[in-house]
Amino acid sequence: MSAEGPRGDTLRPATTGGKHRMARANRSAYLESALRVLAEEGSEGLTIAELCCRLGVTKGSFYHHFSGMPEFVTALLEFWEDQRSQRLIAASEAESDPEARFALLMDVAMGLPHEAEAALRAWGRSNAEVRAVVERVDEARERHLADSMRLVGLPEERARVRARMAMAVLVGTQQRENPVNIDGLRAMLEELNADVPVNGAVYRPTIP
């Protein structure tokens, strides 16, 4: 007899302390797990079976939340764009102090799911939907970086070029390194911005 959770969510029994319990996975759990799969196995490893195995649920649980892989991929891209781009940009825009914003942006860059993003970029070379979202995320990040550079007084053209250089460092590092050397990435971005004026003085980061 099959076990079903609320609203028909089919779940696999798990055992803890000799007692059966029902493993559960919500939409966010699938999406976060998918980013980990991408980081570790690339898009080729992103299957329903792999997701369910990692979460300890049956395929019925997956189909309770998603109609199939096409809908799941769309949801994953929306999740990544919202959580790892739009919300982070909004948090940065809310910070009006230039020095605090620079520090926040540096922390944001270090905390990105770099290996998963590298896999998304590789996937985008053969998948138009993925490519469109990756390009949109990159454009939004670069645009916000340019706005932040203008906030500290850089002329528009210099701000635009500096933002593009920063994105080139980020994307290039994601493509070259697996895993990404976070300390090395921070050092490169800090060196890139070492002459940016912040609060009337030149930004002088501490570079290891």
Image: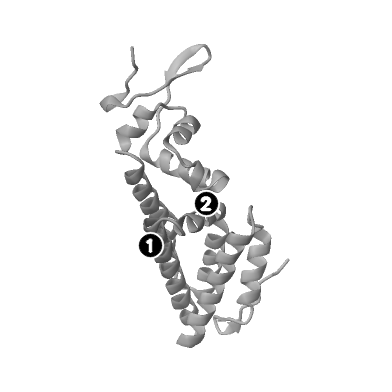
- Identified at 68% across, 63% down, the residue is 184
Q: Give above or below for 157 relative to 58.
A: below
| Residue assigned mark 2 | 116
- Identified at 35% across, 48% down, the residue is 75
Secondary structure beneath dot 2 equals: helix
Residue 86 seen in the figure: no
Image quadrant where one finds the N terminus: top left
The x, y position of residue 149, in whole percent, is 50, 79
User: What amino acid is found at the position of numbered circle 1 in the picture?
Assistant: Ala
Viewer-nearest residue: 61 or 69: 69
Image quadrant where one finds the C terminus: bottom right
- Identified at 62% across, 82% down, the residue is 195
| Residue assigned mark 1 | 132
Secondary structure beneath dot 1 equals: helix
Viewer-nearest residue: 132 or 196: 132
User: What amino acid is found at the position of numbered circle 2 in the picture?
Assistant: Ala
Q: How is this picture coloured?
A: one colour
Q: Is residue 187 left or right of residue 14?
A: right
Q: Give above or below for 129 relative to 204.
A: above
Residue 141 seen in the figure: yes
Q: Are marks 1 and 2 in contact (CB under 8 Å)?
A: no
Whole-Å distance between the Cαs marked 1 and 2?
Answer: 16 Å
Q: Give above or below for 59 relative to 185.
A: above
Q: Is residue 6 left or right of residue 132?
A: left
Q: Is disc 1 surrounded by few (<14), some (14 to 19) or many (20+) residues within 10 Å? A: few
